[in-house]
Image: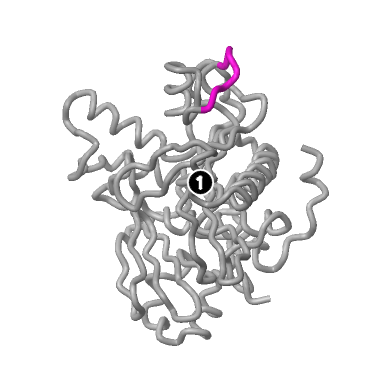
Amino acid sequence: MGAVTRLPPLPPTVRLQRTLSNDHPVAERAVTDTIARTELPFPLSRRGKVRDVYDLGDALLLVATDRVSAFDVVMPQPIPRKGEVLNLLAAWWFGRVSDLVPSHFLSVDPSYIVGRYPELRESEPVWARRSTLARKLEPFPVECVVRGYIAGSAWQEYRARGTLAGETLPEGLSESGRMPEPVFSPATKAETGHDENITFARMAEVLGLPVAEHLRETSLRIYERGRAIAAESGIVIADTKFEFGADGDGSIYLIDEILTPDSSRFWPADQYAPGRSPPSLDKQPLRDYLETLVERGEWSKQPPPPALPGWLIDQTSERYQTVFRRLTGASLDEVSLAGWGTA
């Protein structure tokens, strides 16, 4: 924990700047506009579950929409301000681990992005604040999952077989319990359908042992840094996933998103206790609601997805914004993006 106090000063790319002096309620402000799909004047590289990725020629524009997925199915209604939270929180985290690993991050400053790509000026209201200008890299076809606590599918496997992704775990672990050491648990990446947990040996077969070992050690260091920082805000990061890519010279970079409510399991520290499933500050309550539909035979976890009730949409939006404010110390409306990535 003590290492957190010795972090180097944050670079301009990730320094939060307060633009409002008053406090904001959890919901931040009423928002009626959401972005579920974008059509920008550049080639669409791919449309993922949440992000629309555009090829700008010498860089990528990663647009975090307000789409939300569960069980690898995109829900019909977007979540207000979700894309903004994902984009800006990832940028904030990239700066806090920049001494551990370089990232694809270039900028989230709309003025800088428009100055470099004038064709985006007209569509700026659509992509601003929810988009990251990023290096073009070749992604590795593996997700690097780190689990510090045993929950969800990991707990189900452990309870049944005493393993995680086929690897034996110590005996006597309890649901949501903190593991003696964080466990690296890789998975295959899937644009559609379900990701699949794999062993480290299988990961080494896919990527080669030197790369696999580098990604494992880097992932564990990032997780430990993130866990310590989040603890200062009263948040437990139970587990998370990272993605990496390489440039033409073979240099490895952290890509995609990092330590967001979409890629991580967040618990409020003051409500955490081993032996039960704690309340979540991520999208787990949305999954829990959908599970009740599955139990009643109203959904099969396959498309088409069910409509989400308004109360669940509102609570999910509030939950995402709460995580952002607790971690960064600022609300979305207090953040100026000027200079984020241009220095």
Give how far across and how far down residue 301 sits, in percent.
24, 36
Task: Please state the horizontal and vertical placement of residue 151, each as a whole percent of the image.
Answer: 49, 27
Residue 333 % position (x, y): 53, 60
Q: Which picture quadrant has residue 92?
A: bottom right
- In the picture, the quarter occupied by the C terminus is bottom right
Residue 198 in sight: yes
Q: Quadrant of the N terminus?
A: top right
Inspect this view and state whether residue 133 appears: no
Residue at image location 48% in from the left, 33% down from the top: 280
Residue at 30%, 72% (x, y): give it.
39
Q: Quadrant of residue 307?
A: top left
- Farthest residue, direction top: 172
Rendered view: 81 above or below 227: below
Query: Which residue is at 52% across, 48% downward?
Result: 260
Vertical comparison of 56 with 298: above or below: below
Total number of numbered discs in the rendering: 1
Q: Is the magenta stretch mostly helix, strand or loop?
A: loop
Quarter residue 302 falls in: top left
The image position of residue 196, as x and y in percent, is: 39, 39
Q: Which is nearer the eye, 214 or 207?
A: 207
The residue positioned 62% from the left and 54% from the top of the image is: 93
Residue segment shown in magenta? 167-173
Q: Secondary structure under badge 1? A: helix
Find disc 1 in the rendering and name its residue. Answer: 205
Give the left or right position of residue 110, taking residue 180 as reference. left
